[in-house]
Image (spheres, coloured by chain):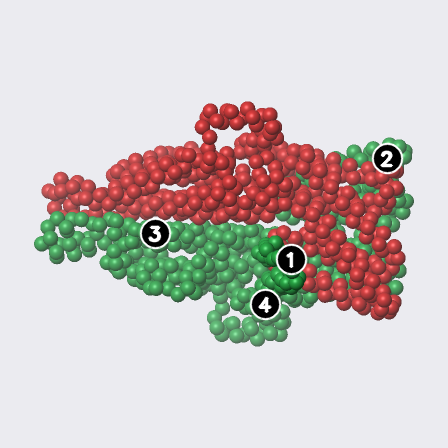
Chain colours: A red, B green
Amino acid sequence: MAHDDKGVVKEVEWSIKVEDGPWKRARISCSMCVFISSLYSKLCKFMKKAWEIGVNDPRKFIHCLKVGIALTAVSLFYYLNPLYDGVGRNAMWAVMTVVVVFEYTAGSTIYKSVNRICGTTLAGLLAFGVQWVASKAGKQLEPVIVGVLLFLLGSAATFSRFIPTIKARFDYGVLIFILTFSLVSISGYRIDELFDMAQQRISTIIIGTSLCIIVSMIIRPVWAGLELYVLVTGNLDKLANSLEGCVAQYFEAQSTSEESNKKLMDYKCVLNSKATEVSMANLARWEPAHGRFNFRHPWKQYLEIGATMRRCASCIDALVGCINSENKSSDEIKKIMSTTSMKVGANSASVLRELSITINNMTKSKKLDSLVKEMNIATQELQNLLKSYSNTHNVNAKETSSLGDAKMEIPIMEVIQVVTVISLLIETVARVEDIVKSVEELSKLAKFKPEMSKCDKSKQRSTQNKILPDQHDEEATIKTLQIV
Amino acid sequence: MAHDDKGVVKEVEWSIKVEDGPWKRARISCSMCVFISSLYSKLCKFMKKAWEIGVNDPRKFIHCLKVGIALTAVSLFYYLNPLYDGVGRNAMWAVMTVVVVFEYTAGSTIYKSVNRICGTTLAGLLAFGVQWVASKAGKQLEPVIVGVLLFLLGSAATFSRFIPTIKARFDYGVLIFILTFSLVSISGYRIDELFDMAQQRISTIIIGTSLCIIVSMIIRPVWAGLELYVLVTGNLDKLANSLEGCVAQYFEAQSTSEESNKKLMDYKCVLNSKATEVSMANLARWEPAHGRFNFRHPWKQYLEIGATMRRCASCIDALVGCINSENKSSDEIKKIMSTTSMKVGANSASVLRELSITINNMTKSKKLDSLVKEMNIATQELQNLLKSYSNTHNVNAKETSSLGDAKMEIPIMEVIQVVTVISLLIETVARVEDIVKSVEELSKLAKFKPEMSKCDKSKQRSTQNKILPDQHDEEATIKTLQIV
């Protein structure tokens, strides 16, 4: 809803200020025009923004069409007589299931479907038991027994939703359990064909969920696992760009364009992606094997990688803060440290990019070890350079010893920024090593294959072309996602 | 569900190894005992964990009782004849509404209730229109027209859920809109008393939501706004503890207990609280005025404060990383910098604690300005100390000038850690100032009153005792929450 305060105020002003006369109506209608046109322009802006959301990620458009298809398909149970005769008015439950269960990712749809079916079945059986016991106690006691049990079971089930493991896996199932138990046990008081009702409810729910799962998995599926995987590899690249960029910007003291500045801030995405990672990892475990991912792919390890990445990102955040601080260093020391520092920055960025490639290809990288070694050597060099700096400096001071006491002074304030940047860089390198460890753990858990030589690759590709066409589809999706 | 792989394996081993004979049965039953007892002990652990969750925050127990009460109350519509005669079998919708709408916080319950009512009403009206138009086109064309419109509207409404503003405020409403529109427009094909059905659905939903809102707001309400407020003030205190603690630990080089070490890591909570803050802020705006919060309390500003706090926390994270790094500084320079650095740490912690008190009391702090000034003076002192360090050092070196060249060397590697810690500390102070600004912005937006003298306070309190007893309740709740 778009409220236009300014427009309203203008209109009020108009109607107060104008004197009675033949112009009054014209003026009011004019202010109405202003109001409507501003409303219209706001609506246009909103539509433009919405359109951009879809254009930036066309899978969102496709998802909407999929929901439309599933809804229209399930409505056939009402419109076609042979189908309607089978389920009757309870077809309503199938429609309801489609609306509630169909989610953006396949994982989420499966999670909700399985939870809905299990919750309904369990609660239905339990409610029957309760109803049977209660009915033996007579018509007067029945509501009391059912009421007390409803209170107890409702409370207990609600409490279970606070327990983290249940919350992560069965939250929706517990909700449906409470819902079905209440409906069936309460209805039992008035309805005689309770068993038919429950049976029809379950069969219509199965119809609805099957339809959702089929549509969601067949028409351009969006896998939560793949989303997580693309998010993590993308974040590794972002981290690499930010790290390399900010070191280069500082030591080269280049005036940067807005675009490259924006790229420097990429690490902030990493800091903010925890919630998405957790929810995607929770949903991914419901998904069947797809593309190169097995059913029991170690999705949890991606969370571990995410956590180490965030630690690295907060170090980069401090680095950026330090670079923008007021204590500027002298250009002299910056020049001396420049080459080696930029080497450290570039090397650690290469390590991060190689990690991204490793995860992307799901192969053990041959280059990784040597890249890490290079990074560590460069870091050691930087430390040595820093160590030798005071000597160098003294040599310089000696040359200008005619200035007397000046030779003894090391202007710490001129050095403090560079020293801080360098030690934060060293700390960042240590955290990059943590990321390396967590990715290596992933490669163990997911049994990444050793990298092949180019010759092997082309051989394997020709075999894959014959047996795994869907993997190519997946690769194309990943490329699209990475561009997005 | 607790699977015990070990137990199962043991059982299999037993049944393979044992030879046929009179002991076989006894052994199998023994392995069953082991299996059951391990299952039992796992269950006990699970129950203990669940119990602890409730004991740590008794409001969770209360919430479960509230759900039980609401469920039992709504079931009366089925059990009591006068009530049942009014709504009939549609009482089911009321039960359903209670299960689906009742949430932990009052804000969430209100958000869902309002969305459910609005979504149902809007969709109901629209579906009538569609049904009326379609019925004019004849029995054959009707399903086609309804089907096409269902496809279009379903897709469009699903797409709107991707738009951030709609997602944040009306996500549930759009879901219910699609649900109701589908049900009513499809049902129209077979049911004649469509208007009665829709009317009853709306009235039962209103009954259910009203019951939820009443129970949720009257019996020990959990306000999302209050949760956000307690989270933010608590995080300010945590930040203060971490900052002060890690500076003190570094410069005093005290061996720390596990408990104090745990406290040092408190800043990590701040880094991880974004998702909770955003969802609480979104829900808080649905809540009516409660305690000291108006209906239009600027909840969004708490997100701003949260963002500045996270920036500060990532600086502390780098600081902690730096303190634990391998390059240890000499004790000499640490001693020289110790007093002033700890003063900076303590002063910025005081500023953070004062900010927490400011938000807590919702009054403009008198002390804040002077505390910020003190913090800045201490920071300036620290910078000056660092400036003068090289001179001091040379003086010391001069005294030992018999050692020849030694006097000219400043061991940078021995200084690097301290210099980094200090400049990170200075950067942290700059970020603390950002927090101060965002809290000041909050105090403007929420119109915090100026702090009163003690005399004024006691006067006001005696007046409040007469007119605002619920504020005292709220204060008690805040105290409990802060302990939790």
**Quadrant of the image for the C terminus of chain B?**
bottom right
Separation of residues labelled 4 and 2 (CA atoms): 58 Å
Q: Say the numbered circle drawn on residue B55.
A: 4
Q: Say the numbered circle drawn on residue A211.
A: none
Host chain of mark 2 = B
Host chain of mark 4 = B
Separation of residues labelled 3 and 4 (CA atoms): 39 Å
Separation of residues labelled 4 and 1 (CA atoms): 52 Å
Q: Few, some or many C-alpha atoms within 10 Å of disc 1 (few <14, some 14-19, many ≥20)?
A: few
Residue marked by disc 1: B20
Label 2 or label 3, whichever lies nearer to me, is 3
The earlier-in-sequence mark between 1 and 3 is: 1
- Same subunit, labels 4 and 2: the answer reads yes
Between residue A164 and residue B424, name the one nearer to us.
A164
State which quadrant residue B125 falls in.
top right
Residue drawn at x 35%, y 34% as measured from the top left: A254
The earlier-in-sequence mark between 4 and 1 is: 1
What amino acid is found at the position of numbered circle 4 in the picture?
Answer: Val
Asked which secondary structure carries label 1, the reply is loop
What amino acid is found at the position of numbered circle 1 in the picture?
Answer: Asp
Residue marked by disc 2: B142
The earlier-in-sequence mark between 2 and 3 is: 2
Between residue B202 and residue A438, name the one nearer to us.
A438
What amino acid is found at the position of numbered circle 3 in the picture?
Answer: Ser
The earlier-in-sequence mark between 3 and 4 is: 4
What amino acid is found at the position of numbered circle 2 in the picture?
Answer: Glu
Label 4 or label 2, whichever lies nearer to me, is 4
Whether residue A419 is visible: yes
Residue marked by disc 3: B325
Residue drawn at x 12%, y 48% as measured from the top left: B405
Separation of residues labelled 1 and 2 (CA atoms): 73 Å
Say above or below: B227 vs A327. below
